[in-house]
Amino acid sequence: MGDLLGVAVLGAGHMGADHVRRLDRVVSGARVAAVADPDTARAKDAVAGIEGVSVHAETKAALDAPGVEAVLIASPGPAHEEALLAALARGLPVLCEKPMVPDSAGALRVVEAEARLGRRLAQVGFMRRYDAEYRRLKELLDEGRLGRPLMLHCVHRNVSSPPDFTSAMLIDSSVSHEIDAARWLLGQELTAVTVLRPRPSSGAPEGLLDPQFVVFETEGGALVDVEVFVNCGFGYQVRCEAVCEAGSARVGDDHGMLVTARGSAAAEVPQDYLVRFADAYDREVQSWVDATRRGRVTGPTAWDGYAASAVAEAGVRALESGSRVAVDLAPRPGLYGARLR
């Protein structure tokens, strides 16, 4: 491995271009060696001004490009399985944006492929695990000072949804972050899902069931509720409150600038996730680069990616049926340990 870790970035859209910028300007110890996107003009725009980067239309061409030692996948979810399996086959460490693979069957194929290698190569991009507030909440729960967690109350709001956003995507795209955060914070698998649907907001596109109220049950007897509202109109908000036997703790309240003028005060509300979680993304990618340069893989595992997809699938079935749906997880391979961490 050279002085700088050569990274192939797959996908040059909103997320991929931001990761290109991060690798080039923020993160130390790495460089962008290749970029792949079917829209090569977009890929060229993303790497404009960066020297020594090859641009490709095809994933495998980027993986095989000179100087590539690791892969960051930021392409659309349906393209992830092929890219992950190709990277694993080449022995390349991977940081894959969520969802690892949208459908649980495909995600399980990635888990099984990595298990056959007998070593971890994949990390999944659940960046909330790297957010300073979420990390402090995790430490507090692990210390046990507040007693046994009973409930998590979560809020996930977006200004507006992208074109073609579906009712199912409120769960398998947006709430997938809460799924992983709840598993990680509580150290428990989620075992069942119920989805309640209030009357849709007048600000939601026609036919979109927005907002939704999602309730998860855990193997330890805790409950997790998530208000997901992707067309709230005013900002991007993420909050989480842990209610325990001896106290509670909440994160996500204090973000943005407070402006005071002409006898009034107003707080700025972040408008998207790249603003709210900018520091978390920076820490996540830096941690991945540092571990990869040491020959290690840390952070959320392929199993975490599979579990999130399986829970989200159960959530979509609950949304469509109006019934409580149990989560069915495959046996966990020994590569990922016996318990959540």
Image (cartoon, rainbow, N blue to C red):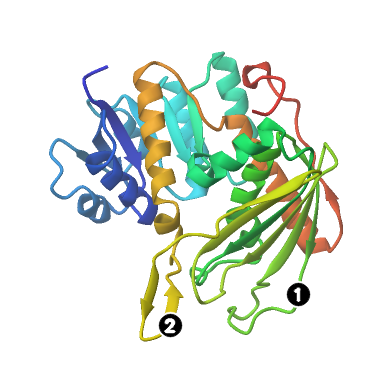
Q: Position of residue 314 (x, y in %)?
A: 76, 49
Which residue reaches farthest front? 263
| Quadrant where the N terminus is found in the figure | top left
Total labels: the figure holds 2
Q: Residues within 10 Å of mark 2 (few under 14, many from 20)?
A: few
Q: Position of residue 78 (x, y in %)?
A: 52, 48
Which amino acid type corresponds to the residue marked 2 in the rendered image? Ser
- Which residue is the extreme one toward the top? 118
Q: x, y (%) of residue 183?
A: 68, 39
Placement of 258 over or under 113, stated as above or below = below
Which of label 2 and label 1 is nearer to you? 2
Tell me the residue that label 1 is attached to: 198
Report the Cα–Cα distance between label 2 and label 1.
34 Å
Residue at 49% over, 40% down: 130
- Residue 42, quarter of the rendered image: bottom left
Dot 2 or dot 1, earlier in sequence? 1
Q: Depth check: give the residue in front, 304 or 76.
A: 304
| Location of residue 302 with respect to 114 vertically, above or below | below
Name the residue at 51% across, 48% down: 77
Q: Which mark is residue 187?
A: none
Badge 1, how many Cα within 10 Å: few under 14, some, many 20+? few
Question: 258 and 241: which one is in front?
Answer: 258
Figure quadrant of residue 202:
bottom right
Rendered position, 229 above or below 123: below
- Mark 2 — residue? 264
Q: Nearer the viewer, residue 217 or 197?
A: 217
What amino acid type should be assigned to the residue bearing mark 1? Pro
Q: Secondary structure at mark 2?
A: strand
